[in-house]
Image (tube, rainbow, N blue to C red):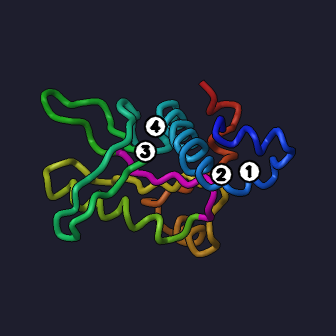
Amino acid sequence: MRRRWPELEAYRGETVWGSVRETFLAQIVGPHFEALCRDYARGAGEEVFGGFPAIVGAGTVNDPENRTRIEIDVAVFSPPDGGRAGRLLSLGEAKWGETMSHHHVGRPARARDLLAAKGYDTRDTILACYGGSGFTAELRASAAEDPGIRLIGLDDIYAPDAIG
């Protein structure tokens, strides 16, 4: 904001905010919301992901066929079993400022398939959508029918028992 200080001193805050709002949402609010979602996943009970969430993080999965990388905002693993990595309980996408739809389930689903091909235990991996702005009616209907899709909204993330 230092570069914009003269405009702010001239009472042009609304103009400044209009030009930096998208950057603020993308670089500050979005990553903070993703961190809140990972905190929620760490504290989730076994019933949320079908197992105890021992390791929670974020990362990327290479998709050589499409020559892209899939960003995973929330990855949840069960405890390691002997010398093997834990079961992949959930892959999730977090969006603060947009209503989530089937499009948002596609990327984690593709990542799950790629990880399964690499030998990860993806049986029963839940595809999670963490939505700060809600979910489309179509996605809600799909999640109601498919136990492999979990919708996690602000009411879940900010529930009194979700806060560690």
Please provide percent x and percent y for residue 54: 37, 30
Q: Is residue 120 left or right of residue 164?
A: left
State the SS at label 1.
helix
Residue at mark 4 to residue at mark 1: CA–CA distance: 42 Å
The magenta segment is 89-99
Who comes first in sequence, dot 4 or dot 3? 4
Query: Which quadrant: the C terminus?
Result: top right
Q: Nearer the viewer, residue 89 or 46?
A: 89
Q: Earlier in the sequence, mark 4 or mark 2?
A: 2
Q: Which mark is residue 17?
A: 1
Where disc 4 sits, the SS reads helix
Spot the residue most to the bottom.
138
Mark 3 residue type? Val
Which residue is labeled 2 in the image? Answer: 20
Answer yes or no: do the residues labelled 1 and 2 have beta carbons within 8 Å? yes
Disc 4 versus disc 2: nearer the observer: 2
Q: Which residue is mark 4?
A: 46
For badge 2, the amino acid type reads Val
- Asked if residue 133 is positioned above or below residue 33 in the image, the reply reads below
Kindly report which numbered mark, 2 or 3, lies closer to the viewer in this rendering.
2
Which label number is shown at residue 74? 3
Horizontal and vertical percent for residue 124?
A: 33, 54
Q: Nearer the viewer, residue 12 or 23?
A: 12
Q: How many marks?
A: 4
- Three-letter amino acid code of the residue under disc 1: Trp
